[in-house]
Image (spheres, rainbow, N blue to C red):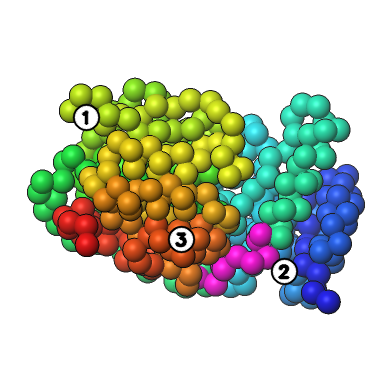
Amino acid sequence: MTAKIKVLVIDDSALVRQILTQGLALDPAIEVVGSAGDPYIARDKIVRLQPDVLTLDVEMPRMDGVDFLRRLMPQYPLPVVMVSSLTQKGKQITLDALDAGAVDFVSKPTTDMAQGLKNMLQELRAKIKMAATANVAHWKADRRAVTSQLRTIERRALAESTDKVVVIGASTGGTEAIRKIITRFPETMPGVVIVQHMPAGFTRMFAERLNQLCAMEVKEAVSGDRIMPGRILIGPGGLHMEVTRSGGHYQVRCEAGPTVKGHCPSVDVLMHSAARHVGANAVGVMLTGMGSDGAEGMLAMRKAGARNIAQDEASCVVFGMPRVAYELGGAESLVSLDHMAGRIVDLLGERKI
């Protein structure tokens, strides 16, 4: 019999702790081993109860979830699913939490509380089971050493690459992976388009945060935005993003549509469009994430002449999307996250094998 996933619920509200505990208990694969009203109590219970996964409220008194994560992860890395509010402050703290090591998040309902709560608990149960498989061991490394390596990539000459497009797909764990890669890109880099699985309202803030860190311009995409050297476009939450060609340049189209592989925006949608319109001028990159979104689109890109790589298992939080992309034949090779930016730059100057 498979062991149950042991969960510790951390929230300052006794009512929320009760709701989460009862809601998680509906899944026979999950066992709530305890709850805590603040991070100080949680710290002692983590050592005593040894949970597999934490659920953590974003906004708490005494110490918020982000400060707690920054102290916890280097010492005692555990998969954490944040419980987030959809307020502006809540979104900002949620992105801080992902930067600090949280695997994923769910949003508290704001309308139709009964149905919204049911949907949130269903999503939380699914993400806890995913989080239980996540690799968070790398957070025990010296974070200062990692930070000091940002932008150390050699600024190679990108001659004859201005018509190239870098196409990146990511899901669980992707916000940190994307940050590590694109902060190493020089401002002369060809245009980059990214789909990161994230709800509407979060992608704009994600783009704005990255824009403060990168040599390149980073923005949430809108239909008609041109893909050009020095610019990174993030697909907006709730809309599919496609690459199109208009005369002598590439641009994006962002439109509502049904979910693909359970997602909107979908990596498959983006990569299929890159296969059609960019072909051999594209470099495809598949980063950490659960499921198979993007694998078929990446294969179409490769058949159209693109050079494609995927993140290796050791550096992934969840080795799902990269694994499927590689096994299906869409990705030529698996590359560690630390070497990803350099490999992308190399591929921009190479021809297809």
Disc 1/disc 3 C-alpha distance (Å): 30 Å
Q: Amino acid at mark 3?
A: Leu
Residue bearing mark 3: 328
Picture mark count: 3
Q: How far across and how far down the image is residue 326, in percent?
A: 43, 63
Residue 41 at least partly seen: no
Q: Considering only vertical position in the picture, is 136 above or below 66?
A: below
Label 1 sits on a secondary structure element that is strand
**Label 2 crowd (10 A; few <14 / some 14-19 / many >=20):** many
Residue that appears at 25% across and 24% down = 246
Q: Amino acid at mark 2?
A: Asp
Whichever of labels 3 and 2 marks the residue nearer the N terminus, that label is 2
Q: Quadrant of the N terminus?
A: bottom right
Label 3 near label 1: C-beta < 8 Å? no
Q: Quadrant of the C terminus?
A: bottom left
**Label 3 crowd (10 A; few <14 / some 14-19 / many >=20):** few
Task: Tell me, for residue 52, which label it has, or none.
Answer: 2
Residue bearing mark 1: 249
Pick the front one: 17 or 144: 17
Q: Quadrant of residue 261?
A: top right
